[in-house]
Image: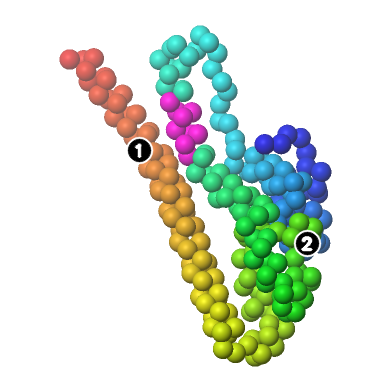
Amino acid sequence: LCSGESALPGGDKEVRSLLAGAGPEDKAPELTFTKEQTDAAMMYLKNSVRRSPGRALKKGEVKTDSGRQYIGMMTEHDAIQSAAEQPQLAMVAASQPNEATKDVLAETLQTPSSIAWFDENASAEAKRTGMMSLREFESFEVNRRYANTDYQTDLQAMDGDNLLRESIRIQSLQTALLLGIKQQLQENAIISGQQLSLEGAQYYEPRLAQKLQQAAAGATRQ
């Protein structure tokens, strides 16, 4: 993680650093991050979810019963924090220029409609490197077809094998997007389970503590 303040406006405290790339408020969304935008997104993550609820124990404190219990509680907190961080870490990772997109992007940009969409909407980093992040490539593949009137002209001109190949590409894209949704649902289920665990602990801990005191008092009287 980077320390200090972000060089980009609001980069360390605004969620747009994660969703659309840090920078001026009026800039267009950028789904392929520069190094500076990546640093800003990681600083936002640090400020929003990566918190420490306690300090490191001193040498003498570690050896006590309370110290060992403290370490156990910190371990439990770290496990939950890991799940809290995961969606943001995954988004930052999916916003990096990806070498695997280079060749397929170059092939796609052989058609006039794709070039027109790329020139108008691609991120500065994609234009500079000839690569897109996985996030931007997914958005590009969808929007160059369904939000691009020039594509309709290209589609009308297709026939035979070209039309069949385009149909297969669209089906493959739909499958990939559905898989992404499934993976996100799985991650959300993990986080929801941990939230339920926390709620259960918050409900039962004071009640169990009270019963424990009553049990201890009863044992003392015997």
Under circle 2, the secondary element is helix
Report the residue at 64% width, 39% height from top.
Answer: 46
- In this orientation, does residue 13 appear? no
Q: Position of residue 65 (x, y in %)?
A: 40, 15
Magenta segment: 72-80
- Determine the image quadrant of residue 28: bottom right
The image's mark for residue 61 is none
Amino acid type of disc 1? Tyr
Q: Which residue is mark 2?
A: 127
Above-or-below relation of 63 to 83: above
Q: In the rendered structure, are the residues bearing label 2 and label 1 in contact, judged by CB atoms less than 8 Å apart?
A: no
Does residue 107 appear to the left or right of 64 in the view shown? right
Residue sticking out furthest to the left: 222
- Check residue 74 for magenta coloring: yes
Report the residue at 38% width, 33% height from top.
Answer: 206
- Check residue 221 for magenta coloring: no
Of residues 210 and 173, the one drawn nearer to the viewer in this rendering: 173
Q: Position of residue 96 (x, y in %)?
A: 67, 52
Q: Who comes first in sequence, dot 2 or dot 1?
A: 2
Q: Main secondary structure of the magenta part?
A: helix
Q: Position of residue 142 (x, y in %)?
A: 62, 73
Does residue 63 appear to the left or right of 16 in the view shown? left
Of residues 208 and 159, the one drawn nearer to the viewer in this rendering: 159
Q: Which residue is mark 1?
A: 204
- In this orientation, does residue 46 appear? yes
Residue sticking out furthest to the top: 60
Q: Position of residue 87 (x, y in %)?
A: 55, 50
Above-or-below relation of 218 to 102: above
Under circle 1, the secondary element is helix
